[in-house]
Amino acid sequence: MKGICILGSTGSIGVSTLDVIARHPEQYSVVALTANNNLDRLFEQCLKHRPVYVVLLDQAKADEFTLKLKSAGLTGIAVLRGAEALEQVASLPEVDSVMAAIVGAAGLLPTLAAAKAGKTVLLANKEALVMSGSLFMQEVTRSGARLLPIDSEHNAIFQCMPANYCAGHAALGVRRILLTASGGPFLNRALSDLHDVTPDQACAHPNWVMGRKISVDSATMMNKGLEVIEACLLFNLPPEQIQVVIHPQSVIHSMVDYVDGSVLAQMGSPDMRIPIAHALAWPQRFDSGAEMLNLFAIGQLNFVAPDFERFPNLRLAYQAVKAGGVMPAVLNAANEAAVAAFLERRLPFTGIPQIIESCMERVSQRPADNIAAVLEADGETRALAESDIKNRG
Ligand code: NAD
Ligand code: MG
């Protein structure tokens, strides 16, 4: 029986993770659940999975939740509060695996704590890796943590890598990675329409149901940009060896192209329970609850080259990873600020890449040689992005 901590249990990935775990109660026991909102969902999760710890970010919610547990007679669950408690539960001795499923930079320190503590880290929170880059990978190597990718593309690549491959080691014989992308809801929209698209239109992803931030990232293709950076780090390849391929059906989740001309692909329904179950059961396999792939119903698979004019964020992400240093953290922070503003209707959709590019031009490049430097660049960029957003009126 393995103990698991789920950082961000009330989100889309958190819910799918608990769904898979519920199918295999003899293999996993839930030690800790953490959330920032949606107390009703968290309460249902507590009823069903009986964690030992729950972490909420703010005091008022923690107090409210404690009362809720008490009045339902649910005892034996400790309610902790604050960002430090996230790091604490991610490194508990009774925790074997940590599902890193907080969205954005807020997940960095707890995910890093899990890596430092040598846990099996199931990594969904790509922003944490993009920001901290090789610092994160060094911690994984130093502590002997195991890093298993949850992002469907990276999980696919992991499955197509040589059997003796282990994250962070260059894989011999790999020529390039073909990173697939659906192209999101605006793949074929007239460019002149993009200025006026609404948050709900941007979040209406054709194939996947996800949290709102990553849904907007899919519409701008920043999600793929972050994934290019994620792939460079996880698989130790330069950006020149990562080719983005638009594949609107989302059936192939990515491919690995070998020097002998073999191309290995991983396919499946667009259901995040597949990569989640893969990582939870690894190196074995178990049922995820996903539907069997019906190739006859799908009929055909299409592939298109990405268009950097339609998706300037993809160009900016390649630029950031090539620049190195704090630039990936700057890219990420500017994007988080711009996406939040777009979701709050303070910024048009087409303003997102403009804010990011302007931040990347103005924040001074420096080495990302410690976490404090990364967090400083993150804070500086957010302040700059916010003032840009305000100044646009
Ligand atoms: P979501 O918005 O549905 O859930 C986010 C979770 O994090 C929630 O539990 C929320 O309460 C918690 N949270 C939010 N802000 C927080 C904060 N400041 N401090 C602590 N907790 C906080 O997001 P999601 O779609 O589940 O995505 C989670 C992560 O997984 C993201 O990094 C995303 O890029 C990645 N991911 C998601 C999918 C998907 O299909 N949803 C696929 C691949 C990768
Ligand atoms: Mg993905």
Image (cartoon, helix red, strand yellow):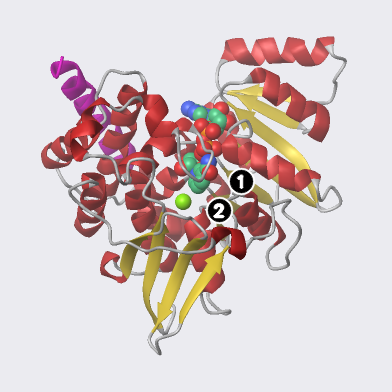
Q: Nearer the viewer, residue 149 or 262?
A: 262
Q: Is residue 388 above or below residue 335?
A: above
Q: Left or right? Give the position of 336 relative to 47.
A: left
Residue 392 part of the magenta-drawn span: yes
User: What secondary structure is the magenta-colored segment mainly?
Assistant: helix
First along the sequence among labels 2 and 1: 1
Q: Label 2 belongs to which residue?
A: 150
Using the rendered image of the protein, determine whether residue 345 is visible from the camera's viewpoint.
Answer: yes
| Image position, residue 362 (x, y; %) | 11, 37
Q: Left or right? Give the position of 220 relative to 260.
A: left
| Image position, residue 16 (x, y; %) | 65, 42
- The reply to whether dot 2 and dot 1 touch (C-beta < 8 Å) is yes
- Name the image quarter holding residue 343: top left
Question: Of helix, strand and loop, which one carries label 2?
Answer: loop
Crowd rating for badge 1 (residues with CA inside 10 Å; few <14, some 14–19, many 20+): many
Amino acid type for the residue under numbered disc 1:
Met
Q: Which residues are magenta?
A: 372-393
Q: Label 1 belongs to which residue?
A: 99
What residue appears at the point 31 percent right and 23 percent down from the top-left corner?
341
